[in-house]
Amino acid sequence: MLSNGINRVFRTAGFLVLVAITSCVPVENGTVVLGPQEPSDLTVAAETDTPTIAPDSAFTLTATAADGTPPYAYRWEQNDGPAELDLSEVELTAATLTIDAIEETGRYVFRVLVTDSDGFTETAFVVVEVQPTMTIEAAVDTGELFEGMSATFTATTDGGTEPIEFAWVQAEDDEEVALEGETTATLTAGPFPAEGVYTFSVTARDDNEVSATTQTAVEVLSAVSIDVPELAVAGEPVEMFVTIETPTEGLTFLWEVTSGTASFDDETAEEPLLTTTADETVTVQLTATIPTDDGGSITVTREAEIVSVVEEFPRVSVTTSLGSFTVELDREAAPLHTANFLYYADSGFYENTLIHRVACAENEDTGECDPFVIQGGGIERIDGELELKEATRDAVTSEAAEGQTSMALYDVSLALSGSDADSGATQFFVNMKDENDFSSVEIFTVFGRVVDGTEVLDVIAAVETEENPFAPSDELSLPMEDVIIEAVTRIAP
């Protein structure tokens, strides 16, 4: 405490401020006068932006002077505390004092001495409590969670001063669910209306305003899934398959055809039969109503596409900027690949993609470069740059013929990723070499053959090429002028 002046202690804004009103100290003939010659109205107040902080947290102290005779001179120092702070690198002569961190917990007192231009002084004190860090964890008390179910989350804290308050919040980009117990340590959320990942954050705040926040996420799985055939033959009924992960009394079903021409034998059955009628991709939708434990219900929808064909060997026309050729598909030998290729054709996926690879192989007898493969269907040019066009459905399971050792001239197959036979997606290639026995040919599924327009393939095979970033290293197979696939369309039977 100061030895001269009057000490005043008061609380303001939730923290302790001690102001000492001291005497002035002018000098007369080299002698310090202990009392003021004239009274001064200089006043000083001090505060902190964070009266209670966690260890290693930064904080700022601010002094405010009024009246007296400005300008004012400031001087900060530590007055008390469980550890002596190193303030040698801190600015101590400004109105504000910023301290980056204090490691040891406890009550720290700081004093600021303000002197006006007449030499009068006033002092103010600020208290900062450095409290032990509080930590928080949150966990969900359920195993697998499916649509229509609820979940309970529990928050636990370590450290902090009782009582502790809690506040739960759901992430804004999640589909909203009902919450109960948002201001307690235990939160009940649900029922969840849809599959996906839901994120919740919880903040704990103790009696000294020390807080801690954590997040927890839960994955909600599909309660209802449907499995439909990839390929349907017009006029032949095919069965829909449904998997229910949360068997519940009172489930109801409603099927409908949302695009294409087809019909169900029973639209309210769990697994009805569907009959298609035309060459097209048909989209079906299941709406399932699931009762919930709270007496309500949720509604979930599932969609699937079924490729319908009329002929045993459906045909498509591939129209390019250099002409058109016809591919005949073999739905008996490769139904999955046929359905996949027709799905992308029906959806318009191939429009404006490129024939991006025109490769040749050196003829051992003539030394000339004979056509090898023509490949396209997965690269497009955007703003002048070549870019991969992402597939919109899963890759196709291999249907490669057992014992296949070569591919015939004009056979059509899907390009693969490395040697993964199950990685075919959108890119297709036409074999341009009679009895092509290139490496690992046995992993490719031949699902079609060019039956018309082979002269167009010859034109494409003759284009000038350059180094290809989408082909094996140093292969000169990228057409120097774009060969564009303008459309891939079905040919009516």
Image (tube, grey):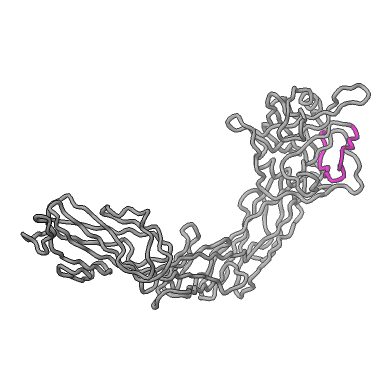
Location of residue 301 in the rendering, given as x and y in whole percent from the top left corner: 59, 60
Name the one closer to the observer, 61 or 332.
61
Up-down: is 280 above or below 43? above
Name the one closer to the observer, 123 or 451.
123
Up-down: is 186 above or below 288? below
**Which stretch is magenta?**
434-450
In the image, what residue occupies the spot 20% across and 66% down? Answer: 19
Name the one closer to the observer, 8 or 269.
8
Location of residue 166 in the rendering, given as x and y in whole percent from the top left corner: 42, 72
Which residue, as the protein is rendered here, is positioned at the far left?
38
In the image, what residue occupies the spot 48% across and 70% down? Answer: 136
Location of residue 403 in the rendering, given as x and y in whole percent from the top left corner: 92, 47
In the image, what residue occupies the spot 71% across and 48% down? Answer: 307
Which of the 4 image quarters holds residue 146? bottom right
Looking at the rendering, in which quadrant would you find the C terminus? top right
36 to the left or right of 17? left
Looking at the rendering, in which quadrant would you find the N terminus? bottom left
Whether the magenta-drawn stretch holds residue 446 is answered as yes
